[in-house]
Image (tube, rainbow, N blue to C red):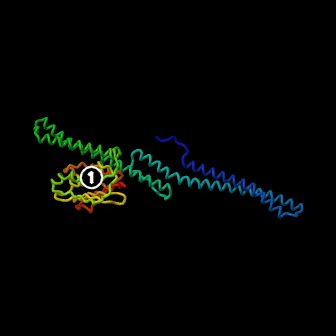
Amino acid sequence: MRRTSGPRLRTRLLAANLVVIAVGSVTVLLAVGFVAPGAFEAAMGHAGSGMDDMGEMMSGLIRVAFRDAVQSALLVAVVAAVVAAVVVSLALSTRLSRPISRLAEASRRIAAGHYVERVEASTNDEIGELAETFNTMAASLEATERRRLELVGDVAHELRTPLTTIDGYLEGLQDGVIGPGEGTWTLLRRETSRLARIVDDLQELWRAEARQLPVTLEAVDVASLLAAGAERFVTLARERSITVRIDAPAGLPAARADGERLGQALDNLLSNAIRYSPDASEIVVAARAQEGGVEIAVTDRGPGLTEEQRAQVFERFYRVDPSRSRALGGSGIGLAITRALVELMDGRIWAESPGPGMGSTFRILLPGAG
């Protein structure tokens, strides 16, 4: 709701300038009115010493003429100064108020949902900086709205697939087309588990991004955590002859993190690496001390990432290869949850890859416990 309209900025700026003009004009008039006559009298008294009566009369006429000339000159000067000042003030106030008015109008359009709105940053002063900040804010809002719409569509798609399968089998059971055998119940159970997993992942992601998850930051033995994480995936990796190798030097300093949340983030990275790694390949889980912290890296020999994919891989429901990801059981939320968990622990996560077909490395940098 718009506020009750008051004086426009341009009007207030002009009024302020007019007040300054008025004060300046009065100051000049008073100064000249008090100083000029005295100075003139002093000069005339010095120059007219020893004058006769005729000289005194001429001196009086000169004084009157001087006073009238000064008053006329002051009046003309003040009028000219006021006119010039008003013109300049109008130009300056218009120049200052116009970009602010454009910003206000653009803000109203953004508030109405037009997130593509931008303003021109035509100056290098504070107003230009304000316009650039406004454009950055508008771009962020546009990206957020786009991600929100994509999230709604992705969630609908993810839920529709298992629901369609379940509905189809239930209809078949009802019509007698499909028999209630062990395979049918296994499939239905698998699809309901998939639904439950998607819902749980969404809830976990929301809680992590909203910083609603309880986190206890303490000293964590990273080497032991990596070993435990690799142990949890030994069976899954062995099914495809994948080797998980730990590379952590002795004397590795502790990280300041939540052990349970860091283990969850590592599990997501290992699950992702095994899902995309080719059979009989190697996954390396490494840890190194960095300045002020500890870095964990999970490297696979999978399909790799392009520069564009590296920038988007942590987005919700993003998949490098959508058809392959769904076939392998990925929901597209794991890496988004991992990023939220790492940031919840004041850490940073990013992806690296030499290019498509050359594997990927996901790195987590956490502050040190010291």
Q: Which residue appears at 88% of the width and 63% of the height?
A: 51
227 left or right of 134?
Answer: left
Residue 175 percent across, percent down from the top left: 12, 35
Camera-nearest residue between 124 and 337: 337
Residue 309 percent across, percent down from the top left: 28, 57
Q: Which residue appears at 60% of the width and 52% of the height?
A: 17
Quadrant (top left/top right/bottom left/bottom right) for the C terminus: bottom left
Where is residue 63, by image quadrant? bottom right
For badge 1, the amino acid type reads: Leu
Camera-nearest residue between 6 and 263: 263
93 left or right of 360?
Answer: right
Residue 95 percent across, percent down from the top left: 53, 54
Q: Which residue appears at 47% of the width and 53% of the height?
A: 130
305 left or right of 138?
Answer: left
**Does the rendering let one see residue 336?**
no
Q: Which residue is mark 1?
A: 266
Numbered disc 1: secondary structure: helix
Residue 123 percent across, percent down from the top left: 49, 58
Where is residue 206, by image quadrant? top left
Say few, some or many: other residues with alpha carbon within 10 Å of mark 1 (under 14 / 14 to 19 / 20 or more): many
